[in-house]
Image (spheres, grey):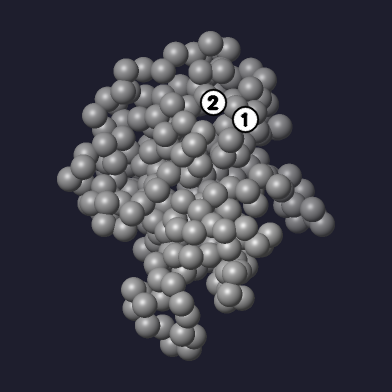
Amino acid sequence: MTSLPQSGPRKLGLVIDLDTCVGCHACVTSCKEWNTGGHMAPLTDYDPHGPDPDGVWFNRVHTYEHTRADGASRTMHFPRSCLHCDKPDCVTVCPTGASYKRASDGIVLVDEQKCIGCKLCSWACPYGAREFDVVEGVMKKCTLCIDRIYNQNLPEADRVPACVAACPPGARHFGDLGDPQSPVSQLVAERGGVDLSPELGYEPVNKYLPPRAETDRAPRMGAPAAASLNSVAGGDGSDTSGATGLLRWIDRVLSS
């Protein structure tokens, strides 16, 4: 099985603002477009013009109508991709070393030359971030666009993952989460950013910023007055108070 490297000081990753995401799928399409010709290319499509199209996508957005105990509701958009965990079982279960985590920046990658398509990594990942390409016969996943972020031929402002560059409302942020003074780390500290399903012990590098109360957000045209969205309830009526509760509810929905 594959061993994890000694953790380095840099931890490149994403911070996703659930309060700002509008579910436009610009991150999804830009990711697909870039990676179809990038490091993990090609990304196969299955029956793209038929009645049941499918394919390899590194980034997906799930949308839910989230109802609180008092009956108030809000449409929630939840982007999902690889979280580049500090303790990824998808790496340690790999029998060939195809799945690996880089010590230099913490990014989790797949070496297609070593991948035998056994799918152990996809079974080990609780976040559903692995994508098996049946045409190529190998596992593929988000790379944080390593062919963009290290490309010296691009202007520095463009050296970010395609999903970050394409996000219209600026809900996606990229940087070094291993540096407590970096802008992304300060954003996480300021907004109370959280891990997805921290009880699993995978220690995701990517963080989610929970929705803010309506009273803490900038007013929007036609936005109804509402009580705090920090106290919410799942669809089954169970209490899911606070940021951790909200993400636990989302995890429960994704797992159902």
Where is residue 44, by image quadrant?
top right
Label 2 crowd (10 A; few <14 / some 14-19 / many >=20): many
Give the answer, above or below, for where 54 lies relative to 111: below
Q: Residue 116 appears at what percent x and percent y?
A: 64, 17
Three-letter code for the amino acid on which mark 2 is drawn: Cys
Residue 63 in sight here = no
Relative placement, left or right, of 127 versus 177 is right
Disc assigned to residue 90 = 2
Identify residue type, mark 1.
Ser
Q: How many marks?
A: 2
Q: Is residue 255 above or below residue 237?
A: above
Q: Secondary structure at mark 2?
A: helix
Label 2–label 1 contact, CB within 8 A: yes
Instruction: Between residue 245 and residue 166, name the one nearer to us.
Output: 245
Q: In the rendered image, which residue does mark 1 sit on?
A: 122
- Residue 145, x across and y down, in percent: 41, 41
The kind of secondary structure element at disc 1 is helix
Q: Earlier in the sequence, mark 2 or mark 1?
A: 2
Residue at image position (26%, 36%) is: 178
Distance from disc 2 to disc 1, alpha carbons, whole Å, reads 7 Å
Residue 105 visible in the picture: yes
Residue 226's tag is: none
**Relative height, residue 129 to residue 77 (above, below):** above
Q: Residue at x 44, y 87 (%)?
A: 221
